[in-house]
């Protein structure tokens, strides 16, 4: 991998990851897509049929498989929260980029979302609490952070590239 994107739901990992990969002319891998492909059903359906622990196991398996691939990896918002994943990301040689986002922006970006079971379960206030619980982990696992609130996805790509080239 050239870079791994972490951050809360709605921070833009999937959107920016696709654009960054295209821009660098490398493949893009998204853990959620890998999980959906392996399970043969949507994330929403995995949560409904099998529960969150089953989803987290699939997520861990997908992360383990993806770390050896080339390109850009977009994780899910909960990926760094499992201890085993946290250690894998922290010990990886690949730069880990935190896409940061303010609660107001998350609410705005996800207000019509129907694909994220946790967002649906928790409601918007619950989401903000969850972000507060997770932020420390995102900070610890990442090499640098980009605040995305005031940036377009393409501007986020440019900010990541500036930081990556300094690090390479
Ligand atoms: N920088 C940005 N500015 C405005 N909207 C954004 C930005 N990044 C992502 N979005 C929008 O926010 C929503 C969630 O983005 P997504 O890439 O799925 O986030 P994640 O994968 O981190 O959950 C999508 O509707 C996307 O178009
Ligand atoms: O934060 C989380 O626990 C989750 C985030 C989602 O990915 P995005 O961060 O790409 O929305 C997806 O993996 C699942 O719905 C659980
Ligand atoms: Mg995503």
Image (cartoon, rainbow, N blue to C red):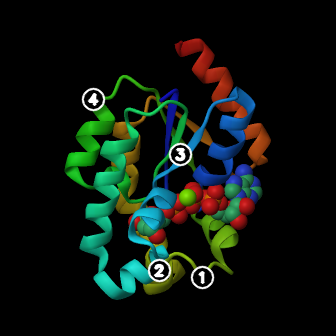
- Marks 1 and 3 sit apart, C-alpha to C-alpha, by 22 Å
**Label located before the other in sequence (4 or 2):** 2
Residue at disc 2, secondary structure: helix
* Disc on res. 29: 3
Which residue is tagged 4? 91
**Label located before the other in sequence (4 or 1):** 4
Q: Nearer the viewer, residue 52 or 35?
A: 35
| Vertical comparison of 56 with 87: above or below | below
Residue at disc 3, secondary structure: strand
Between label 1 and label 2, give the one nearer the viewer. Answer: 2
**Label located before the other in sequence (1 or 3):** 3
Identify which residue is drawn at 57% across, 64% down: 103
Q: Spot the residue most to the left.
A: 84
Which residue is tagged 2? 44
Q: Position of residue 46 (x, y in %)?
A: 39, 78
| Vertical comparison of 29 with 26: above or below | below
**Label located before the other in sequence (4 or 3):** 3
Q: Are marks 1 and 2 in contact (CB under 8 Å)?
A: yes
Between label 4 and label 2, give the one nearer the viewer. Answer: 2
Specify the quarter for ligand 3. bottom right
Residue at disc 4, secondary structure: helix
* Disc on res. 114: 1
Q: Are marks 4 and 2 in contact (CB under 8 Å)?
A: no
Between label 4 and label 3, give the one nearer the viewer. Answer: 3
**Disc 2 residue: CB within 8 Å of ligand 2:** yes
- Marks 4 and 3 sit apart, C-alpha to C-alpha, by 20 Å
Mark 4 nearby-residue class (10 Å; few <14, some 14–19, many ≥20): few
| Vertical comparison of 39 with 45: above or below | above
């Amino acid at each position: 991998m050239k870079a791994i994107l972490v951050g809360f739901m709605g921070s833009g990992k999937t959107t920016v990851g696709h654009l960054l990969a295209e821009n660098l002319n490398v493949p893009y891998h998204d853990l959620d897509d890998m999980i959906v492909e392996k399970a043969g059903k949507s994330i929403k359906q995995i949560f409904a049929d099998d529960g969150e622990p089953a989803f987290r196991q699939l997520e861990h398996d997908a992360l383990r498989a993806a770390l050896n691939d080339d390109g850009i990896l977009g994780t899910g918002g909960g990926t760094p929260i499992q201890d085993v994943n946290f250690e894998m990301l922290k010990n990886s040689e690949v730069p880990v980029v935190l896409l940061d986002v303010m609660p107001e922006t998350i609410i705005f970006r996800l207000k019509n979302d129907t694909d994220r079971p946790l967002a649906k379960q928790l409601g918007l206030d619950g989401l903000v609490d969850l972000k507060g619980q997770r932020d420390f982990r995102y900070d610890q696992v990442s090499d640098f952070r980009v605040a995305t609130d005031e940036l377009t996805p393409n501007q986020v790509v440019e900010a990541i590239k500036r930081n990556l080239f300094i690090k390479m």
